[in-house]
Amino acid sequence: MKTLFLKVDPENPGPTKIQAAARIIQQGGLVAFPTETVYGLGADALNPAAVLALFEAKKRPLDNPPIVHVADPEEVCRLVEEVPPKGAVLMEKFWPGPLTLIFKRSNIVPQVTVAGLETVAIRMPKHKVALELIKQSRCPIAAPSANLAGKPSPTTAQHVYEDLNGRIDCILDGGATNIGVESTVVDLSVDPPMLLRPGGTPYEALKEVLEDLKLHPFVQAEQEISLHEVRSPGMKHKHYAPKAEVILVEGNVPAVIAKVKELAESYRLKSAKVGILATDETQVAYKADVVKSLGSRFNLAAVARNLFRLLREVDAENVDVIIAEGVSSEGLGLAVMNRLRKASGYRIIKTEE
Ligand code: AMP
Ligand code: MG
C-alpha cells in the first residue's frame, strides 16, 4: 500500500488536504492525524471493517479498544446510553482537551470498536486538524495512537512514518504535538468515577471538579498488576517499550545521580552501550555513550512533551540499556512516571540518601 503523506498547517489547515483525508475515512481507509496529545490513527468508528483494518495496521490486540473522537459534545448522545451528570460537568470544563470519558455505550457502536465491551471511550480533541478531519468525515473517528503496538506513542508525523509507512492510507503531518502524552482516561460507567490512565489532564485539576474521583491503583503501580485487577484493557498490554532494556531510577536527586552513575559504570564494564535519560539539572553529572535531557525537573509539561521522542531517539542509537531518571508525580508528572514505569517493564530502583 502506498501511504499518502500530506503536510498541513496545524493552525490553518485549509479545506483541500483535509477533504482528501476525510474521503479516505469515508471509504473505510486509515488516516494518521495530529491531536494535541499524540498522533492518532483514525478510522470511521461506525464501520466495523475499517476499525478491524485499524487493529491490523497497528498489530494491536483485538481486546484493546480505541478511543472514539468527536468534534462536538452533542455527538456523544447517540454513542452512549446516557450522559451522567458528572460526565456533563467534565465535558463542559475539559472539552475540547486531553480527557477521555468512558460511558455505557449505545447499540450503534460496533462490537469491534469497543472490543466487545459494554462501554465506549470518547474524547473531543483540541487540535484544528483533528477537529476538521472529524467534521469533514461526518462520522466519529476511532483512533488509537498511530504507532505499532508496544512502541512509544508518536509525537511527530515522522514517528508515524517510521512505524506505519506502507500499512496505512494517509498521514497528515501537522508538526510536533504539544502535550506529548496521551489523554487522561476517566471511567464514568462506575460511581465513584475512576481515573484509569493518567495523561494530559492532571488528576489534581479533575479532582477540583470531581471530589469523589478515585485513582485506579494501576496508575501509580510499581509492578505489573494481576489480571483480575484490570479495568481498562490497555492496562495488561506491553507498552512504550524501546528495543533496549530500560531501568528507572527513582528517589531524591543526589541519590538518583549517584545510582545512575553507578549503574552506567557497571554496564560500561560489561562493554554495554549505555543511554541515559537525565534532566536539565542533572545531565552534566553523567558520562555515557548517549546522554539526553527530558527537560527541566521544574517544567513537567516539557518533560511530557519530550518523553516519547527521546525514548525513540535513544533507542535509535542502538544502546543496550537506557537508564532513566524519575521525576515528581505532580501534575503531568503522574503520566510521565506511569509511562516510564511501563517502558521499564517495572525494572524500578528506589534510592535513598
Ligand atoms: P490509545 O487509543 O492507544 O490512546 O489507548 C486507548 C486507551 O483507552 C487504552 O488504554 C484502552 O484500553 C482504553 N480504553 C478504550 N476503551 C475503553 C473502555 N471501554 N473501557 C476502558 N478502557 C478503555
Ligand atoms: Mg496507544
Image (tube, helix red, strand yellow):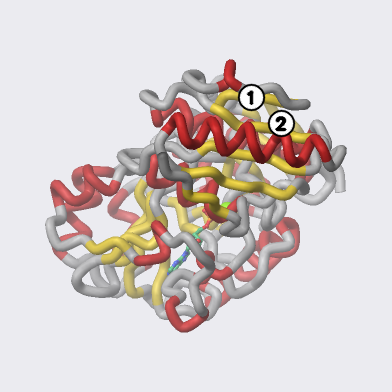
| Location of residue 345 (image quadrant) | bottom right
Amino acid type for the residue under numbered disc 1: Lys
Q: Quadrant of the C terminus?
A: top left
Residue 313's disc number: 2
Within 10 angstroms of label 2, few (less than 14), some, or many (20 or more) residues? some
- Which residue is at the far front? 353
| Location of residue 185 (image quadrant) | bottom left
Whether residue 331 is visible here, answered yes or no, is: yes
Within 10 angstroms of label 1, few (less than 14), some, or many (20 or more) residues? some
Q: Residue at x 24, y 71 (%)?
A: 82
**In-image side of 243 versus 303 (left or right):** right
Q: Closer to the camera, 1 or 136?
A: 1
Q: Residue at x 47, y 79 (%)?
A: 117
Where residue 54 appears, x then y in whole percent?
67, 59
Q: Is mark 2 within 8 Å of ligand 2?
A: no
Q: Looking at the picture, does residue 102 appear above or below residue 100? A: below
In the picture of the structure, the residue carrying the numbered disc 1 is 292
Mark 1 or mark 2: which is in front? Answer: 1
- Which residue is at the far bottom? 228
Where residue 187 appears, x then y in whole percent?
32, 66
Q: Closer to the camera, 59 or 224?
A: 224
Looking at the image, tell me whether mark 1 or mark 2 is earlier in sequence order: 1
Amino acid type for the residue under numbered disc 2: Glu
Query: Distance of mark 1 from mark 2, alpha carbons?
Result: 9 Å
Q: Looking at the picture, does residue 67 appear above or below residue 175? A: below
Q: Residue at x 57, y 38 (%)?
A: 259
Q: Closer to the camera, 228 or 47?
A: 228
**In-image side of 338 versus 5 (left or right):** left
Whether residue 125 is visible here, answered yes or no, is: no
